Amino acid sequence: MGAKNVCLMTDKTLSQLPPVRVVMDSLVRNGINFQVYDEVRVEPTDSSFMDAIEFAKKGAFDAYVAVGGGSTMDTCKAANLYASSPNSEFLDYVNAPIGKGKPVLVPLRPLIAVPTTSGTGSETTGVAIFDYEHLKVKTGIASRAIKPTLGLVDPLHTLHMPGQVVANSGFDVLCHALESYTALPYHMRSPCPSNPIMRPAYQGSNPISDIWAVHALRIVAKYLKRAVRNPDDLEARSNMHLASAFAGIGFGNAGVHLCHGMSYPISGLVKTYKAKDYNVDHPLVVKKIPHGLSVVLTSPAVFTFTAQMFPERHLETAEILGADTRTTKRQDAGPVLADTLRKLLFDLNVDNGLAAIGYSKADIPALVKGTLPQERVTKLAPRPQSEEDLSALFEASMKLY
């Protein structure tokens, strides 16, 4: 790439761990100048993005390397974008209705993404997600232009992940695959944009994304439990790391829908949850539920709700995840997939619904209000949903077992 001045982005915990050392040793050995930014916030916010953007603008870098999970890769994408477009306001590229959702027309610098979790698939996508603190909602930037130039997917970089992080990031892979496979088909999405440059990054389920989603789901079905239960199972860890990238290629083009749309207020509003195994100084731990957990807790309710639109697809995914569907009627596709998911979550010792992580019925109006701005993903659900529908979905997710 001919890079002379590289920005290496990571977070405080990872900066002390082997994946970052490997990268630094390589840069030093090859005589490449670099500066380290290790202030990435786990579950980034608009202000943590802006801090990284400021660093990138000052450094005038000609390439970026992001070593970490989705938080690091997404922060680095944003830093690259705004450093390459220095006159833009922060909200210019943020998704509507929160930001202006302008198309990216400037060239960006090369970005190499080195994922250290097996979850977000962010090394494959043109999406960067953050908490917009002022509104207490998650939103993001979505454009093909911010996709990493290269992803280095190496399972050895994931071996420091604690068991609970393996589980939660694995749930993200599971939902990426399920949601992209059951999303509204691309030819049913409307209105059609007037110009291809305005076409959204998330286009609805399509024949190419379907292949990646189903393949990722098969790997999750075979290896997720093994990866969580035995941290030293290199075969399981390797396969989950690949599944994360595969699901990313799928949902990075098809999109996700309600589990993700509803997860954003769940992780934005939570008050009292203490996440196990996460080493963070701010209240992620108290204030933020790990992203994969906030996504998966609504999955039984969501797929019960969406199944009537494409029952065959819902049955097919239930079967891949281990259900015996030989005698199942089409109208039972939702409950069967929901039961299959509940069993998986129960086997992996997942908290018993939203009530177990600090929510009650009194919180449902705020959760619904936080889901409404997530149109970029909620409109990709195969079945449209009213505010009453969303309330019922949150209520059904209060207890899982």
Image: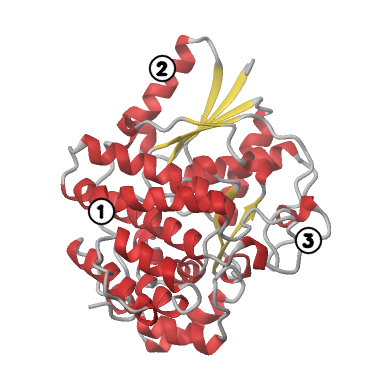
Which amino acid, by three-letter code, is at mark 2? Asp
Classify 10 Å Cα crowding around label 1: few (below 14), some (14-19), many (20 and above). many
Q: Which mark is residue 358?
A: none
Q: Which residue is mark 3?
A: 193
332 horizontally vs 266: left or right: left
Q: Residues within 10 Å of mark 2 (few under 14, many from 20)?
A: few
x and y percent of residue 41 in the render? 47, 48
Query: Which residue is at a point 34% across and 80% down the rendered structure image?
Result: 332
Lower position in the chain sequence, tag 1 or tag 2: 2
Q: Is residue 359 visible?
A: no
Checking the image for residue 25, the label placed there is 2
Residue under pointer 1: 164
Nearer to us of marks 3 and 1 is 3
Residue 99 seen from this side: yes
Please give left or right for residue 199 compared with residue 73 in the image. Answer: right
Quarter of image, res 146: top right
Q: Are marks 1 and 2 in contact (CB under 8 Å)?
A: no
In the rendered image, the quadrant that contains the C terminus is: bottom left
